[in-house]
Amino acid sequence: MLERVVRARVEEPLFDLGLRSPSHHAIFSRNNRYVYRGSGRREAVMRVVFVHGACVRDGEWWWHRTAELLRRHGVASVSPELPSCVGAAGLAEDVAAVRQVLRDSDEPAIVVAHSYGGVVTAEAAAGAGAVRHLLLISSFLPEVGQTLSDFGDGAPAPFLDADPGTGTFGVRPELLADTFLHDCDADVRAEAPAHLARQSLRVTGQPVGAAAWHDIPSTYLVCAQDRGTPARRQREFARRAGRVVELDAGHHPFLSRPADIRDLLLSV
């Protein structure tokens, strides 16, 4: 079922795509901790692993507004840094960084992947027994063997600056707010440039080795006002997910509409 989410509630069922439904449900325990109840009826505390997108650093900053709202519900979260955003590493190192976080705890986890983070998560979450659900936000959703460059038109997006000499690419700072933060408040727009990064170009041509969304229940959040990844393109990826919702938001709804992302996470 494709659903439209408005102000944190599923309000308008759209047409049935015949997609899979998640195979579990969430409840609140007596101490208001977010827990997972599996088929065996055993409860365990749930945690959230956030995987940030391309050309940024300080992952915790990008997720901090949503993470704080989750914390008030007793939901712990972690935001691993992707090595390709702080050095010459490639996709394999990004995958290893996220996979290590998933292995650090046996608590059931929801992985929330944003944009390029969906490429990393496709491989990193594969075979990770603790992962119960994937939430993909304006995310690339690759098949095995696909690369990030497969999703472009052969030329860098106008809001990106690629430098073959240094082997890096990044967001053009002068286009950051209008492209990615147009629905965010003044504080976010002022702080965000300090958290940009030049990322290794290696990640654009390295194929994904697994597609976790084949085996793990998933929700795709289409950001209908996204100026970076058009909604039309997102909906193509979303057809691969188990559940699809739409939000009238730009590229970073976890900064512009964190309560909606919190409520979506607590509903999966």
Image (tube, rainbow, N blue to C red):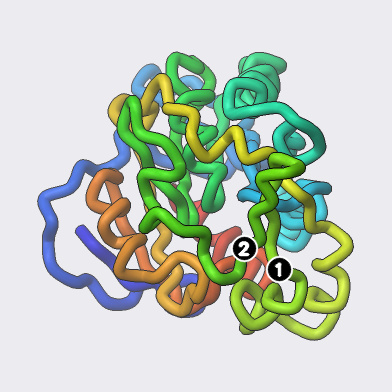
Residue underneath mark 1: 172
Residue 255 percent coordinates (x, y): 69, 68
User: Relative to 155, does residue 46 appear above or below in the rendering?
Assistant: above
Residue pictured at 54% horizontal, 46% vertical: 116
* Residue at the limit of the structure toward the front, as seen here: 165
**CB of mark 1 within 8 Å of CB of mark 2?**
yes
**Residue closer to the observer: 154 or 57:** 154
- Mark 1: amino acid: Arg
Quadrant position of the N terminus in the picture: bottom left
Q: Is residue 17 left or right of residue 173?
A: left
Residue 27 percent coordinates (x, y): 50, 43
Helix, strand or loop at disc 2? strand
- Mark 2: amino acid: Leu
Label 2: how many Cα within 10 Å (few below 14, some 14–19, many 20+): some
Residue pictured at 31% horizontal, 33% vertical: 143
Residue 105 percent coordinates (x, y): 68, 17
Q: So how many labels did they put on this image?
A: 2
Cα gap from disc 1 to disc 2, whole angstroms: 6 Å
Residue underneath mark 2: 160
User: Relative to 15, does residue 169 appear above or below in the rendering?
Assistant: above
Residue 207 percent coordinates (x, y): 43, 27
Residue pictured at 42% horizontal, 36% vertical: 147
